Image (cartoon, grey):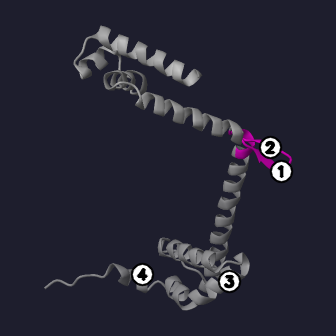
């Protein structure tokens, strides 16, 4: 029977990880005091563990506790820098992509009255298309809404291209007259 080595056994003898585990609660309080967020403090403590566990074991320190707190501070600063860059990037995008008036973003959306009118018109169009005779409606949907050519529509429907052209033309005339009244 061969002896199996535990992958965690190598790390268990790591003095920095042992100190981290002993002082984890203190490290979370350290982070909480600086960030004001217990949840963020837990995240930072986890990042610190990952940093410590992934480091080169040949690197040692005369004062391992001081080293852990130095790395903890660096982890916190790295997170703050990343968030700062993210805020700057978002702010730059907002400046480029949005018009603003004072401190308020101005929306590119249509005014509410125009949006309502457009929805009503679309509803009328949907109703008008639904009221078309079945073959005319199918030809119109295939050609105008689904983007098929006259030839493809004719093949799908099993009719001639000329018949498709007539159905689409008649549908357009019918829809135009119903929507203009």
Q: Residue placed farthest to the top in the image?
A: 162
Part of the protein shown in magenta: 94-109
Find residue 59 and report its horizontal and vertical position in percent: 53, 74
| Callout in the foreground (3, 4) | 3
Residue under label 4, please give it: 11
Element carrying mark 4? helix
Percent across and percent down for residue 78 are 65, 65
- The part of the image, by quadrant, that contains residue 8 is bottom left
Q: Is residue 97 left or right of residue 48?
A: right
Where 158 sits versus 93, above or below? Answer: above
Residues packed near mark 4 inside 10 Å, few (<14), some (14 to 19) or many (20 plus): some
Q: Nearer the viewer, mark 2 or mark 3?
A: 2
Up the image or down, 150 lies above or below 13; here it is above
Circle 2 packing at 10 Å, graded few (<14), some (14-19), many (20+), is few
Q: Is residue 114 above or below residue 135?
A: below
Q: For the residues carrying marks 4 and 2, which lies nearer the camera in this image?
A: 2
Which percent across, then down, holds residue 29?
A: 66, 86
Given the current orientation, which residue lies at the most extreme front position? Answer: 181
The numbered mark at residue 30 is 3
Q: CA distance from mark 2 to mark 3?
A: 40 Å
Which residue appears at 52% of the width and 77% of the height? 49
Which type of secondary structure does the marked residue at label 3 adopt?
helix
User: Are discs 2 and 1 less than 8 Å apart at CB?
Assistant: yes
The N terminus lies in quadrant: bottom left
Residue bearing the label numbered 1: 103
Is label 1 in a helix, a strand or a loop?
loop
From this viewpoint, is residue 97 visible?
no
Name the mark on residue 100: 2
**In the image, farthest residue toward the right:** 102
Q: Calculate the distance from the C-alpha at mark 4 to the C-alpha at mark 1.
A: 53 Å
């Amino acid at each position: 029977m061969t002896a199996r080595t535990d992958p965690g056994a190598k790390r268990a003898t790591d003095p920095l990880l042992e100190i981290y585990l002993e002082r984890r609660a203190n490290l979370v309080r350290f982070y909480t005091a600086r960030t004001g967020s217990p949840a963020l403090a837990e995240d930072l403590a986890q990042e610190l563990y990952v940093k410590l566990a992934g480091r080169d074991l040949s690197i040692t320190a005369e004062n391992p506790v001081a080293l852990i707190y130095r790395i903890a501070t660096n982890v916190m600063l790295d997170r703050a820098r990343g968030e700062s860059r993210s805020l700057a990037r978002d702010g730059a995008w907002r400046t480029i992509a949005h018009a603003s008036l004072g401190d308020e973003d101005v929306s590119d959306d249509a005014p509410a009255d125009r949006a309502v009118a457009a929805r009503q018109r679309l509803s009328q169009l949907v109703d008008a298309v639904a009221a078309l005779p079945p073959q005319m409606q199918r030809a119109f949907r295939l050609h105008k809404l689904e983007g098929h050519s006259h030839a493809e529509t004719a093949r799908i429907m099993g009719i001639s291209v000329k018949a498709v052209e007539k159905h689409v033309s008649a549908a357009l005339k019918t829809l135009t007259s119903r929507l203009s009244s």
